[in-house]
Amino acid sequence: MPGIGVVESQRIHFSEPLHLRSGGILPAYDLAVETYGTLNAARSNAILVCHALSGHHHLAGHYADAPDNVGWWDNIIGPGRPLDTDKFFIVGLNNPGGCHGSTGPSSINPATGKPWGADFPIIAVSDWVTAQARLADSFGIDSWAAVMGGSLGGMQALRWTISYPERVRNALIIASAPKLTAQNIAFNDVARQAILTDPDFHGGHYYEHGTRPVRGLRLARMLGHITYLSDDQMGEKFGRELRNGSFAFDYDVEFEVESYLRYQGDKFAGYFDANTYLLMTKALDYFDPARLDDGDLVKTMGRTHPNTNFFVASFTTDWRFSPARSREIVAALLANGRKVSYAEIDLNFGHDSFLMEDPHYHGLVAAFLGNIAL
Amino acid sequence: MTHTLGRPDFDLIAGWVEPGHRVLDLGCGDGALLKLLITTRNVQGWGVDIEDANVLAAIRNGINVIQSNLEKGLADFADDAFDHVVLSRTLQTVRHTEHILREMLRVGREAVVSFPNFAYWQNLRSVLDGRMPVSEDLPYQWYDSPNVRFFTLLDFEALCGQMGLTIVERRVLDEAGEIVLADSPRDLNFLGSLAVYRLTRPR
């Protein structure tokens, strides 16, 4: 099936200050946004897709002047695809703090006239949800037909059902968790240390020095990438294959897996902003909505709306956000008698499975969304 | 008499639930029983199934379904979360028989269990003739059967006694799905192809 084709992005300005969980304030901000499909007259067919660590508003399709720049979740969005643009109005945004067109650390701080850099306030998942709610208001959308996301995006979908229970009719929480484990926070901290200790970081004000902490960001991405794949998949894809067939006995690239990781690291470090990476990992670490109720997740999930339908999914080979973490969400919803379905999908791509095109996985999403009455 | 969806045990179960009840169906398949109970009895329903195809079919049917392995128990479910926990034609496929029965009555006030009765006279005759039974309620060959436990109505009642479970109601059906009317458990054991029980445990 052909995809959505040529798309355009827009920037929407919000002049009302965003008061953040960290105590910081974003005085005014822009959001980079893309939409696909048509908002119906009742404004009842809108689906919000929340992005994960490195994502943005460009979910699907491509730009007229950049046919190779295909959206990061194009395989699930389009006419006849699970997020069917013939039926739904799909909304994607770059969250505040991002580096793809929304106000973030590389934007100009109006107070100083210089880039925010390290002065950009720490931003939490709940703050993103507040910004997304204002975005919904700007479209005149009272309630989303669905809010959906994978990984950190799934955390936003979960937070929506807690912060604005009456504004989410369906929630799809994929490869996510109710909070990070110590191991997960540890990975994030190693990634942050790689950036923070890069001599080119300059305390986060590297823009003024005309440089970027490319080495640190590259290392952070390489580490992250390992945790997004499964051991089996890496074994199948690279094994112990050597680029030149025999050992060179030096520290250059020898194994194919090294080559792959370095390529991924370089590519990422070439376009992503290090301060945004720091912010995103902190948002992940801080996410723990059960803190609203002294750590009682069952009580917190009781804040969700009894009529909201939940679809929770995990992947068998995902060790960064394991099935057990999704089941915690499911158990807490069930303990409140909430309408929830849970699928444990057998895919071999580790955490990255949520981005893969798989008939069973996509069939489940299509079936769940197919039940939505507009 | 015709039976809903060709499943006479479904009609019995539908008669035992009340509007508003919370029902958990273990081994729910495509969610047909829950769909029936939701549309005709206005219950709240959840299913559990391990098969990908069944999870997909249940979601397509608009049924809440949790993909899970019954052999591992019902850890995702809280104590006393349901009014009825149904295990329809599935007990004979579960290895940990006592564990699942205990789990059902931990998460539910009442358990509804249906299973094929191996002592049904046609089954006995088949064995006497030298072949394992194949019937409406035992539709598999011995080599492709998902069944791992082979037991009779009397065996089941003995286990319930051992476990201290209370049998609230027993319905026994023949191969045509008609209720078998007999007074003694021995006769029911001989005449019934499918047994359906309502169980509780002392609290």
Image (tube, rainbow, N blue to C red):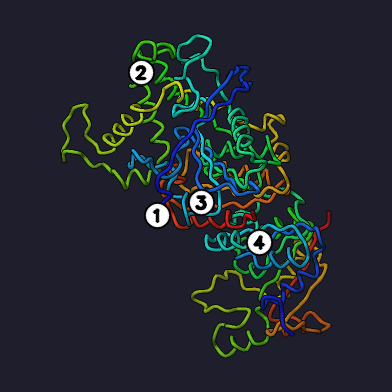
Marks 3 and 2, Cα distance to the nearest angstrom?
39 Å
Q: Chain of mark 4?
A: B
Looking at the image, tell me whether mark 3 or mark 1 is earlier in sequence order: 1
- Residue A120 in the image: above or below residue A63: above
CA separation, marks 1 and 2? 39 Å
User: Closer to the observer: label 1 or label 2?
Assistant: 1
Q: Which residue is mark 3?
A: A85
* Residue B184 appears left or right of A319: right
- Residue occupied by mark 4: B26
Q: Which residue is mark 2?
A: A212
Q: Chain of mark 1?
A: A
The one of A211 and A239 positioned closer to us in this rendering? A211
Q: Amino acid at mark 2?
A: Arg
The reply to whether residue A354 is visible in this rendering is yes
Quadrant for the N terminus of chain A in the image: bottom left
The answer to whether residue A225 is left or right of residue B110 is left
